[in-house]
Amino acid sequence: MMRRLFSPLVLFLLLVFLIGPFIIIVAASLSGGETLAFPPQGLSLRWVAKVFTIDSFRASFAMSMLLAIGGTLFALILGIPAAYALSRYKLPGGETVRTMVSLPIIVPGIIVGLAILRYLVVPFSFDITLALFFAHTALVLPYAVRVVSASLNNLRSDMEEAAVLLGSSRLGAFFRVVLPNIRSGVLAAFILGFVTSFNQVPVSLFLAKPGVQTLPIDMLGYMETTYDPSVAALSALLAFLSIGIVFLAERFLGFSRYV
């Protein structure tokens, strides 16, 4: 009897641990009071509406979208050929290359941000927006390589060879045969990279400056001066956005096969 109750109890506690903070944030965002509090002081949607009226949130949201979309696309442009080479050819030092590509997710983001600031931005007066773009590209590149590699490993190589034997060039076979057959993996890599870049904090914390901030950094700065539930409302909206993107990706792409 105890054994049958133990597993459901552990599962319930795990769900509370994982979902509990999200429920608290959503409840706090619906508070009718003037300060961030849980349990909420009444129910109201005014803080959700206020999120869309704050100029800094709109500007930083646009910057985060630009970095997430642009950085992920550039990472895919670099990562797809790299994944193809690592998957299709036995390259000297291939495992070393895989390890080096994975370094941005192995090394703590604070170290990456500090290194870019110290050795790129400060000595060369490098533009902050470009520094953020390259940093976000480097951070999502490992996901692009790994996810696309997984998709390529599941694709039969003889399909490409058949296209070459029928007269197609190697590049033509890649674009006509390989790329269409791994499009789900490429889309999954884009979604994973987008979510990772959009929610990224440590690197952006070192590189942001007034007027050039990502949304998470702007939210941190906002909470230093204002303690109303609007940050909770924005957090809840972003959480619902991320959940919706991942749900749709799993529904239509089988996202869990690649991550």
Image (cartoon, helix red, strand yellow):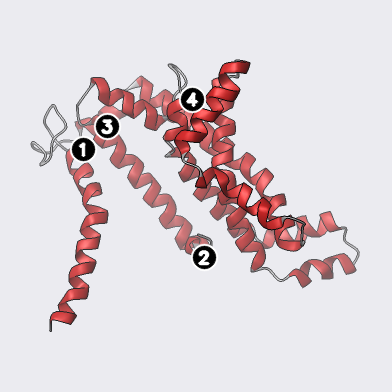
**Spatial separation of the CA atoms under disc 3 and disc 4:** 22 Å
Q: Quadrant of residue 57?
A: top left
Label 3: element kind: helix
**Spatial separation of the CA atoms under disc 2 and disc 3:** 34 Å
Query: Tag 4: residue type?
Result: Leu
- Looking at the image, which residue is at 38% across and 32% down? 216
Dot 4 and dot 1 residues touching (CB under 8 Å): no
Label 3: few (<14), some (14–19) or many (≥20) C-alpha neighbours in 10 Å:
many
Query: Tag 1: residue type?
Result: Ser
- Looking at the image, which residue is at 38% across and 45% down? 241
Query: Tag 2: residue type?
Result: Arg
Mark with earlier residue (1, 3): 1
Label 4: few (<14), some (14–19) or many (≥20) C-alpha neighbours in 10 Å:
many
Q: Is residue 47 left or right of residue 258?
A: left
- Looking at the image, which residue is at 43% across and 54% down? 246
Is 251 placed above or below 242 here?
A: below
Query: Tag 3: residue type?
Result: Val
Label 2: element kind: helix
**Spatial separation of the CA atoms under disc 2 and disc 4:** 34 Å
Label 2: few (<14), some (14–19) or many (≥20) C-alpha neighbours in 10 Å:
few
Mark with earlier residue (4, 1): 1
Label 1: element kind: helix
Mark with earlier residue (2, 1): 1
Can you name the residue that lies furthest to the right here?
Answer: 167
- Residue highlighted by disc 1: 29
- Residue highlighted by disc 2: 257
Mark number displayed over residue 207: 4
Mark number displayed over residue 231: 3
Q: Position of residue 35 (x, y in %)?
A: 14, 28
